[in-house]
Image (spheres, helix red, strand yellow):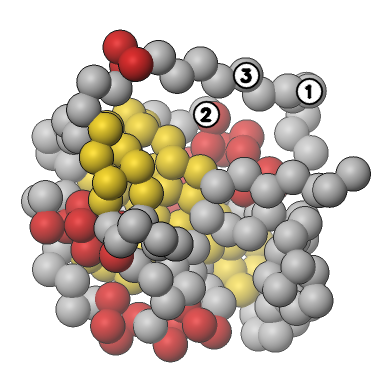
Amino acid sequence: PIRGLRSISMKVSHDDCMDPIRLGRSGDGGWWACGKLSTPCTVYSFGIFDSFSFDQAVADKGCKVHGFDPSKPGLKSKPAYERIHGATYHEFGIGGVDRKYGPGEVPFSWPGIGYLTETNSDPWQLYTLPSIMKKNNHDHLSILKVDVEGSEWAAMEGILSSSWDQLLVEFHFHPA
């Protein structure tokens, strides 16, 4: 839960993005964004798993890309990810507090990993977005991409209090 936040209202106007482009593949892993990217271009991509065509596409446009994923599939893809020119892989993730979580302790919301049938089997270090930006010496992001299987809710307070041009997020809602 986000202290004091009861709802999120977003307004996306055609005037705000006159040049939408697809970055990455057409299926899972690619994302729509506005074509005009700020300079310098710094992108944070949370939730790599084994699909990082978006990260490759923004790196190809000259952006410095930081990928974050502490999961086993993410760590397994780290060597391939690090072959992207201009990309850096971080073995930690985004969360609501700066904390190392033991096995089975990461506070996932639905659907979580495997629709809550799985959890972190190894310790994961999670940080708030403001802490991560400070750690990386960044005060502004061109694009912030968040696909963390329900953990976006715990991280939302830090996301909304940070400076970015474009927010790309996959929201997960519990099927009430």
Element class at badge 2 = loop
Q: Relative to 27, does residue 102 appear above or below in the rendering?
A: below
The answer to whether residue 40 of the structure is visible from this angle is yes
Q: Residue at x 21, y 52 (%)?
A: 58
Q: Nearer the viewer, residue 100 or 93?
A: 93
Position of residue 170 measured from the top left corner of the image (x, y, whole percent)? 55, 47
Identify the mark nearer the N-term, 2 or 1.
1
The image's mark for residue 9 is 3
Residue 67 found in image quarter: bottom left
Q: Residue furthest front?
A: 26
Earlier in the chain: of badge 3 and badge 2, it is 3
Q: Is residue 34 left or right of residue 7?
A: left
Q: Which mark is residue 161?
A: 2
| Residue depth check, mark 3 versus mark 1: number of the one nearer the observer | 3
Q: Give the distance between the C-alpha atoms of the residues marked 2 and 1, in whole angstroms.
A: 16 Å
Give the Cα distance between marks 3 and 1: 10 Å
- Label 1: how many Cα within 10 Å (few below 14, some 14–19, many 20+): few
Q: CA distance from mark 3 to mark 2?
A: 15 Å
- Decide: is 162 above or below 150: above
- State the image coordinates of residue 172 (x, y, percent, origin top left): 68, 48
Question: Which three-letter amino acid code belongs to the residue tagged 2?
Answer: Ser
Q: Residue at x 35, y 42 (%)?
A: 32
Q: The disc labelled 1 sits on which kind of residue?
A: Arg
Q: Residues within 10 Å of mark 2 (few under 14, many from 20)?
A: few
- Relative image position of residue 70 (x, y in whole percent): 52, 74
- Residue at 49 percent of width and 50 percent of height: 146
Label 1 secondary element: loop
For the view shown, which residue lies furthest in the right direction?
176
Q: In screen coordinates, is 127 left or right of 101? A: left
Q: Quadrant of residue 48?
A: bottom left
Q: Which residue is mark 1?
A: 6
At x 65%, y 85%, the residue is 122
